[in-house]
Amino acid sequence: MKRKKGNAIKSLYVFLIFMFLYIPIMVLMAFSFNESKLNVVWTGFTFKWYESLLHNEGILEAVKNSFVVAIISTLISVVIGTLTAIGLYKYKFKGKNVLDAILNIPLIIPEIVMGISLLAFFSIVKLPLGKVSLIIAHVTFSIAYVVAVVKTRLDGYDKSVEEAALDLGATPLKVFFNVTLPIIMPGVIAGGFLAFTLSLDDVIISFFVAGPGSVTLPLKVFSMVKFGVTPEINALSTIIMVLTLVILGLSLTLRNVNLNMKRIGAILTVIALAVSSTGYGIWAFAKDSEKPQQVINIFNWSEYLPQSVIDKFEQTYNIKVNYSTFSSNEEMLAKLMAGGGKYDLAVASDFMVEILKKQSLILKINKDNLPNFKNIGPQFLNLPFDRDNEYSVPYMWLAGIIAYDSSKIPDGMITGYADLWRPELKNSLTVLDDQRAIIGITLKKLGYPLNETDPAALAKAKEELKKLQKNIKAYDSDSPKTSLINGESKAIFAWGAEGSLARRENPNVRYVIPKEGLFLQQDNFVIPKDAKNIKAAELFMNFIMEPEISAEISLHFPYGNPNIEAYPYIDKDIMEDISVYPPKEKLKKGEYLKDIGDAVIMFDKIWSEVKQ
C-alpha cells in the first residue's frame, strides 16, 4: 500500500514538473490558432496566421537563409567533430587534455561574448558579414556539441572489432568506413541533428555575425516582437518548435541503434528527401519577381517600418531592400564600429547621431538629392545633436509618457514621475529597459536636467532609483504595453505609441504627460561611412518623405511623424492622440538625450548596481 502511494506521489511530482515546463509552450501553440491579434483574448479558431506566414516574402527569405546556413554548417561540423572525437578517443598525445578542454569552451561561454568576439575577428580579417560569416560562426559552436555526442557513443566502443578486421586484411580506410563508422553512426547522426537544431535556433551569435541579406528565421522572429507577440509569431514559433522536437526525437532514437551502411544510406536518403521537399514547399509559395538591378542594405529598429512600404519602394525603383534590425542604439553602434554589414542606410537616435559624428562613422548627406526634405517640420530640424542636419534626416520622434489602467488606479493619482514611487504601486510597474531613460526621469524627479552628469546628483538619483525597485514588476523595451493590456501591470512608463496601441485594446487605459517634463527622442536616417550605394540610400530617404508613404508608416506604427505634409493623410484619431502628439506647451518642456561622453560610465555603474 505504501509503495503504491509512493509511486502515485512520484508520478504526480513528475507530472507537475512537466506541466511547469511545457504549459507555456502549449499555450503559445494554442494561441497560434487564435482569431484575434490580441493573445490574451480568445475569439475563435483559425488557420489564417499560418497562411499569412506562407505568403510573407520576408519570412520565406529568412527560412531559406536559416536552412542554407544550418545544412552547410551541420555538414562541416559533423565531419570535423566526428574525426576530432575519434582522434581524442583513440590516440594519446601531449596536450590532449588541453585540447579537450578548449573544445568545451563553446559549451559554457556566454553567447553574447562569443558573438562579440567573432564580430571582432571577422572585422580584423576583413571578412564581410553575410552567409559565410554565419556558417563559420555556427560551425564554431556546433563542433563542440558533435564531439560531445560522438564521444558518448565511443564510450562503449569495442576496439577488438577493428583489430579483427585488420587481421583479416582490411585496410585502415576500409575498417573506418565499414566497421568504425557504422558502429558510431547513431552518435554521428544524433550530433548532426543537434548541430542542425542549434544552428536553426540561434539568435545572439547570429545577430552579431549576420549581414544584410543574411537574416535568419530566429532573427526575423526576434525583430517581430517589439509590438508584442501576435498569433503570427506564435504560428512561426510553433512550426520551429515542432521541427525542433522532430529532430531531437530522431537524434535520441538513433543514439542507441546499431546501423549498417545500407541503413545509413536509407536514413540519409530520407533526410535529403525531407530537406528537399521542405525547400521546394517554401519556394512554391515564394513570389517570382524580376531580378533587381541594385541592392540597398538598411539597418533599423525592429518593427519600425511596414513591409508594405518596402515593397512599394522595390516596385518603384527596382532596387532590392535587404532589411536588418536591431533593438538598441548600442547594438547598432557596435555593428558599425566593427565595420560589419556594409549598410547603406541606418536609423540612429538623437544622442547616437552625435556619437557617430564624433567617431566619423557616418557621412554628410547631400540634401540637394532630397527634394522631399522640405516636407519636414522646422521644429524637427537644426537640433543640437546635428546643427543644419548635415549628417541626419528626421524619421520619427517619440515622447515618453505614463499610461495606466483606470480600473485599477484612480484618475488624478498619477501626475508625474514622482508618483511612480507611491507605495500603492508596489510590484505593479513596467518601465523601459533603458538606463539613460530611467536614470533620466529619476533625475527629473529630483529637479535635475535629463542629461545631468554631476556625481553628487547621480548619487542622489541612484538612491532614489533603488527605492523605485520595489514598485517595478518588469523592465521591457520591446512591448511594455502587453503587461498593461493583460492586467499584469497597473501602469507603464513607455513611448507614446505603446500607450496608444494599449488603448486600442483596452479602453480603460489613460495617459499622463509627466509634469516634470517630457523625455523626448528623435530617430534619424544616417548614411554609414562604408555605404556602397549612397544613391539608393538617397532615393529611399526621399521616398519615405513622400507624404502618402510617410502617413502609411504612421498608420502601422503610431509614433510622432516629423513630416508635416503627411498630416492630412494621417488618421484623425492618431493626430489627436496626446500620447503620440502631446500639446505644444508640453513639448517645450521636453528634453532630448545628449552624448555625455565618459560620464556614461557612471550611468552604467548605477544601472548595474540598481538592477542586480
Image (cartoon, helix red, strand yellow):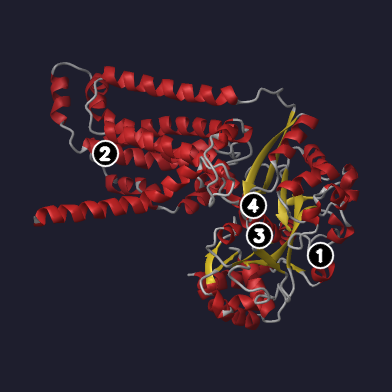
Instruction: Answer few, some or many: residues within 10 Å of disc 1's Cα (few below 14, many 20 plus, some between 14 and 19).
Output: few
Q: Which residue is mark 3?
A: 507
Q: State how far apart marks 3 and 4 are (Cα).
A: 36 Å
Relative side of 394 to 450, left or right? right
Do the numbered discs 2 and 1 sit on residues whose CB atoms are within 8 Å?
no
x%, y% of residue 435? 61, 67
Do the numbered discs 3 and 1 sit on residues whose CB atoms are within 8 Å?
no
Name the front one of labels 3 and 4: 3
Q: Amino acid at mark 3?
A: Pro
Q: Amino acid at mark 1?
A: Pro
Q: Which residue is mark 2?
A: 151
Q: Earlier in the sequence, mark 4 or mark 1?
A: 4
Q: Residue at x 39, y 24 (%)?
A: 271
Q: Residue 216 or 274: which is nearer the viewer?
A: 274
Q: Earlier in the sequence, mark 3 or mark 4?
A: 4
Q: Which residue is mark 1?
A: 384
Q: Secondary structure at mark 4?
A: helix
Q: Amino acid at mark 4?
A: Met
x%, y% of residue 84? 32, 36
Q: State how far apart marks 3 and 1 are (Cα).
A: 38 Å
Image disc number at residue 319: none
Q: Residue 38 or 423: which is nearer the viewer?
A: 38
Q: Which residue is mark 4?
A: 332
Q: State how far apart marks 4 and 1 are (Cα).
A: 21 Å
Q: State how far apart marks 2 and 1 are (Cα).
A: 61 Å
